[in-house]
Amino acid sequence: MTFDHSLLWQYAPQLLKGFELTVVVWLAGSLLAVVLGFALGCALLSKNGAVSLPVRGYVEFFRATPLLVQLFVAYYGGPSIGITLNAFTVGVFGLGFYGAAYFAEIFRAGFASVPPGQIDAARSFGIPRWARIRHIIVPQMLVLSVPPGVTLLIILLKDTAILSIVTVPELTFQVTGMTIETFAFVEPFAVLAALYWGMTELVAFFGRRAEYRLGRYLQ
């Protein structure tokens, strides 16, 4: 069996288009997941049950159900209740809402891990509340949150492959179409694996850099 490079050149435009869409969907979904997850994580720390309990229900629901099921319900079940969304929108919001449930727990754990003694000491010195949050609480929370956060971003990146099921024309969708047309499997999926591996390594690299810089900030 030989590796047919001509197939890759022939389908390069479709693969590049799918790759670009994969990156766009992942970036948009991840941004939504981080921002929403941070807000939900703060809400989980609230002592007001009217705030924390609904958020806890959201987190448990999205963590307890598969992303694929959530995408199917949103894309195919939405029209039955008058909500019709295109595949791209479902992909972005699907990744965002799913990832936000996990980011909420990551941020909650990060905030909860800051030693209360440091906060009490800062308060005793008369340091304002927002200064305590900015210079003491948030930096330590970020240091603790970056490693699991980067891992989750990598998971969301790989989960973009699931979006092909709801017809998002991302990389896996394009590769599947290539295999159907050519009956070749080695070349398309080898490229698919290589591209995902490269993206994953890039995310991991920037994650390590962020962790290093945050660690030096606290020294």
Image (spheres, rainbow, N blue to C red):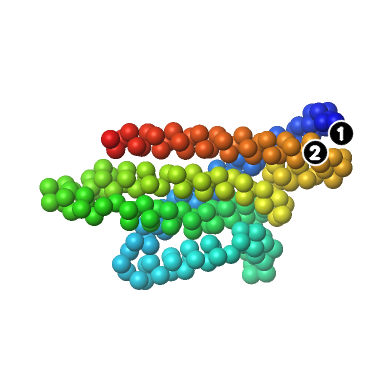
Q: Name the residue under label 2.
A: 186
Is residue 208 positioned above or below 78 on the image? Answer: above
Identify the residue at image location x=44%, y=66%: 56
Residue type, numbered disc 2: Val
User: Percent position (x, y) of residue 6?
Assistant: 83, 28
Q: Are marks 1 and 2 in contact (CB under 8 Å)?
A: yes
Q: Residues within 10 Å of mark 2 (few under 14, many from 20)?
A: some
Quadrant location, the C terminus: top left
Place of residue 64 in the rendered image (x, y in percent of width and height, measured from the top left): 55, 65
**Residue 3 in picture, x, y percent from top left:** 82, 31
Where is residue 100? Give x, y as percent: 49, 55
Which residue is at a point 29% across and 51% down the rendered structure image? 114
Q: Say if residue 109 shows up in the picture.
A: yes
Quarter of image, res 180: top right
Q: Which residue was labeled with disc 1?
A: 1
Residue 39 higher or lower than 187, as above or below: below
Residue located farthest toward the left when viewing the structure as drawn: 125
In-image side of 137 versus 158 (left or right): left
Pick the quarter of the image with the N terminus. top right
- Mark 1 vs mark 2, foreground winner is 1
